[in-house]
Structures are given as structure tokens and as C-alpha cells.
Amino acid sequence: MDCKSNTFFLKFDVDAHTMDVATLSATLMSLTVVMQEINRDVNPSATLTTKINSVGHASFWFEVSPVLATLPLISLATLSNANEIISFLSAILNLRKFLRGEKPSKIEATGDSRVITNVKGDITYIDNRIYNSYTSNPSINESLNTFNKALKEDHNIETITIEDQNKKPLYSATRPEFSELTDCELLSEALIRIQEREQLTLQIARVEFEKSSGWVFSYEGFRITARIDDNDYLLKIRNRRERFARGDQLLVDMNIHQEQDPESKIWTNKAYRIVKVHDHLPLDGGTIELFPGHSLKS
């Protein structure tokens, strides 16, 4: 059996020389459950055990070692190491602290991450795998509630800190924050996402030369209004290197902004953004005339 291990340090800052065993037990068990749940997502073929090592004479410093034991015949190349679980754990703790028990004001899906905006307007980026673990696993949320409740109820504890092997801080919370991080509801699934589509053909119905305004196209049998955000192509238009006729087509890459109805779970298209114009395809290949009543604006 092969093992991969890594460690992080858990520090309790207290205003006394003693620590309640119940607090220690609840916090360590809660973090262990969270790491086990993360492991089920990232390493479904490996078991996870957690060990505590003594650290010199520091009364309430604990060295925590999540150890992955791979099953026979499973290639190590397919498994993430324990350091990834520690990274997931700290990211989830920091996301919870970033939201402070409030629902996000906005969640967007982009590439391999989520862009999350909190109620104060601050923005953070989080890996999709971490986001999915946090939003789809009630055990993680319940364990973090238990973790923070134990800290809140032990009035001797002023700060909780998690550091990596090099004593670099990964997460920290203070007594005033413990209450905000207790009794948090499970974060809702993303209500906003961006679908990235490449090499689409859009038929022009109306041209608009102001960047802030949208052009009207026919797309998959529907009329849509889409803003062009390709500055290089807009420059070609301003330099009078492009002219258009009704029915011409553009070959584009387009982002479709969607919102999900919380009850029906149906996604609805809300906005269209053309991020790249690859080609302009004139109708019938004939003479192209500008729409009547339109003039180029510099």
C-alpha cells in the first residue's frame, strides 16, 4: 500500500492556559469529516485517515496529517495527493468567510471557475471542483457549522488559524467572526452562468455602430440582440473597411449569459456578447450597401 501525506498546523489562540476537550474534539472531528467528503470527490478510490502529531511545547498547536492510502492496482497518476485536500479545505473555509453567512449577490460560471460576488460587492474566484463540493454536499456545510459553533461557545478561544508546512497562513478567523460562520445555509447552486459558443453563424437583421448598443441577429430561428465586444473588428468598421446589407452573416464566438429559475431549474438566455468576429459573409456575394439611414460613427 502506497501512502501520500502532507500536513497543516491548527492553532488555537486562547486567553487561558487550558482548553476545553469538547471544543478540541468537535473542531478536529468537523475538519476531518470535511476532508473525508472532499476526498470522496477528488479521490473516490482512496481512503483518508487523519493523524495528529505533537509540536514541541506549544500547548495548543496541532500538526494535522491527512494520509491517502491508495487501493491496490490503482495508478498513483490518477490520484491527487493529500496537499490537494488541504488546499480544498482552506479554499472552502475562506469562501465561507468571504460570504459571512450571506447568500452571494451574483454567481457566474466561466471556464474552470466560478466568479462569486458577495453582498458587499467584493469578488472572488473559486475552482469549479471546490465550488461543487461546497454547494452539493450537506455534510460539509453541517460539519463547518459544528466547527464554528464549538469555537463560538468556547469563550477562551480568540482566534483559530490554519497554516501550511512552512507556517504560511491558509485560513484565520477571530471570535467576532465565529458567530457569522455558524448556522450557515447550504450555498445554492449557481443561478447565473455563461455558455461559451465558438464558430457560430449569425444573420444580420440590424446594425448598430455604437459599442454599447446591440446588433440584431437571427440565431437558431430567433431574433436576438447581441453586443459586439471585439475591439479589433469595431475598429475595422470605424475605419470604413466594412459595409453591410440585410441578410449578411457574421462568423463569431459568442458568450450567452443565462439565469436559472430556482423552482423549475430551467435556464433562460438573458444576454449575448460577441467576443470575436472571425469573418463577414456577404449575402449572395454581391455588392454590399450600408443600411438606409445608418452612418458610420467614429
Image (cartoon, rainbow, N blue to C red):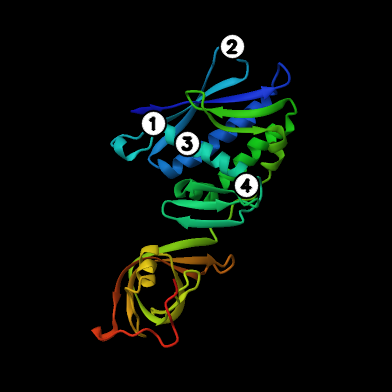
27 lies left or right of 164 = right
Check contact, mark 2 vs mark 3: CB within 8 A. Answer: no
Residue at mark 2: 57
Instruction: Let me know if residue 175 appears in the view.
Output: yes
| Eye-nearest disc, 2 or 4 | 4
Label whose residue precedes the other's in the sequence (2 or 3): 2
Q: Residue furthest left?
A: 285
As rendered, which of 21 and 117 lies closer to the eye?
A: 117
The residue that appears at 42% across and 77% down in the rendered structure is 296
The answer to which quarter of the image holds residue 107 is bottom right
Q: Amino acid at mark 4?
A: Leu
As rendered, which of 170 and 36 lies closer to the eye?
A: 170
- Give how far apart the Cα atoms at labels 2 and 4 are: 36 Å
The answer to which quarter of the image holds residue 253 is bottom left
Label whose residue precedes the other's in the sequence (2 or 1): 2
Q: Residue furthest top?
A: 57
Residue at mark 3: 87
Check contact, mark 2 vs mark 4: CB within 8 A. Answer: no
Residue at mark 1: 69
Label whose residue precedes the other's in the sequence (1 or 4): 1
Q: Looking at the rendering, in which quadrant would you find the N terminus?
A: top left
Instruction: Let me know if residue 74 appears in the view.
Output: no
Q: Amino acid at mark 2?
A: His
The residue that appears at 33% across and 81% down in the rendered structure is 248
Using the image, determine if residue 2 lies above or below residue 140. above
Using the image, determine if residue 19 lies above or below residue 196. above
| Eye-nearest disc, 1 or 3 | 3
Q: Residue furthest bottom?
A: 292
- Residue 205: image location, x then y, percent: 41, 83
- Residue 43: image location, x then y, percent: 40, 40
